[in-house]
Structure formats: C-alpha cells, structure tokens
Image (tube, rainbow, N blue to C red):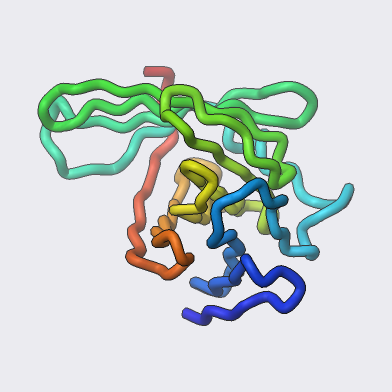
C-alpha cells in the first residue's frame, strides 16, 4: 500500500491499494472531488448496467442478520442504490443514494449528514467515497466479477486527518428479487 500527497490539491491524498488508486479528501469543507484523470470524460466506461439487480452479502452470521443491496437505473446513465440491513438483534435499517458516476457528492437518504460520490475506475470497478459532516471517512473499491454474478468490496476506513485506520473486504452475490 502506498500513500502520497497530491501537489495540486494539498487537502487530498492518494492511496494505492491492490493496484487501484483511491483518492479522498482529508479536510472538512465543500471541496470538489479529486479524480483520477484516466477515467474522466466521455470515454469513461458505463459501470451501471451490469450491476442492476439485487445483491446479498455473503455472511456466516445467523439469522436474522442480512445485508441486501439493490441497484436500479436512475436518470440518464445513473444508478440508485438501496441498502437494507438487519443486524443480529433484528434491528432493521434502510438507506439509499443515487449516482451519475461523475464523482459528485450527493446526499444519502436514511443516514444523517452523509454524502456519497461514485466514479468509474475501469470497466468493472468503481470508487465510492463516503463522507459525513464534510469529512471523507471511507473509500470503497466496488468490483464486479467477470461473470457479473459477484461484487467484491474493499472498504478503506479513514480518520479525520485522512490516515487509514482499517481495511475490510466483503463479497455480495447476485440473487433473485428479495
């Protein structure tokens, strides 16, 4: 894993993890997202279509635990994402957001003071930046398998100064409508 500061944007940093550059902002405020120029512009891949559908988290946790993501078309080339979860105690939560895959932060419904920005990395991967109260606290690399039936997420958690505090992985499998 390599971390470097960006000269043109002193409040941003790049983390290279599993060969993919993650870019996040480490300071509160209304800053525009920092993007990897190799995925910008009209030639950027359309990551939405192959992801449409319902995805369940692989987990060894016993019922009632569950986590289900639903991806659906939104607007012209965008996607809506809804996450419905039930924890081990049976408490349910639902939150959602929309993206146009342009790196712009948009509100997350169901999570107070939260925003999410999504942009393509390549044909099968997207970078998802989550921020709360203006500070990026997590960057996720979401990768669709070649057969289109699995999503692997790599979650990079950050502190308020942008330092990595942990990395987790999760796998979601495509399922029939829940």
Position of 132 with respect to 28 (left or right) is left
Say if residue 145 shows up in the picture.
no
Position of 86 with respect to 12 (left or right) is left
Position of 133 with respect to 157 (left or right) is right
Position of 102 with respect to 97 (left or right) is right
Residue 86, quarter of the rendered image: top left
Residue 91, quarter of the rendered image: top left
**Residue in view at x 66 percent, y 24 percent:** 73
| 53 and 73: which is toward the camera | 73
**Residue in view at x 67 percent, y 43 percent:** 47
| 25 and 66: which is toward the camera | 25
All told, the count of numbered labels is 0
**Residue in view at x 59 percent, y 59 percent:** 25
- Residue 113: give x, y in percent of width and height: 47, 33
Q: Residue furthest top?
A: 178
Say if residue 1 shows up in the picture.
yes
Q: Is residue 69 above or below residue 151?
A: above
**Residue in view at x 54 percent, y 46 percent:** 134
- Residue 162: give x, y in percent of width and height: 48, 65
- Residue 126: give x, y in percent of width and height: 61, 51
Q: Quadrant of the C terminus?
A: top left
- Residue 99: give x, y in percent of width and height: 65, 34
């Amino acid at each position: 894993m390599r971390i470097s500061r960006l000269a043109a944007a002193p409040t941003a940093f790049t983390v290279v993890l599993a060969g993919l550059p993650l870019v996040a902002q480490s300071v509160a405020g209304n800053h525009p997202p920092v993007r990897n120029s190799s995925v910008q512009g009209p030639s950027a891949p359309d990551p939405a279509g192959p992801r449409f559908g319902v995805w369940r988290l692989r987990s060894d946790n016993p019922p009632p635990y569950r986590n289900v993501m639903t991806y659906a078309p939104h607007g012209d080339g965008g996607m809506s994402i809804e996450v419905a979860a039930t924890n081990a105690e049976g408490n349910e939560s639902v939150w959602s957001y929309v993206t146009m895959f342009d790196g712009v932060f948009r509100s997350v419904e169901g999570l107070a003071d939260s925003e999410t920005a999504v942009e393509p990395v390549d044909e099968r991967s997207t970078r998802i930046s989550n921020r709360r109260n203006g500070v990026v606290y997590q960057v996720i690399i979401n990768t669709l398998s070649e057969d289109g039936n699995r999503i692997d997420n790599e979650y990079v958690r950050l502190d308020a100064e942008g330092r990595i505090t942990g990395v987790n992985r999760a796998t979601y499998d495509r399922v029939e409508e829940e």
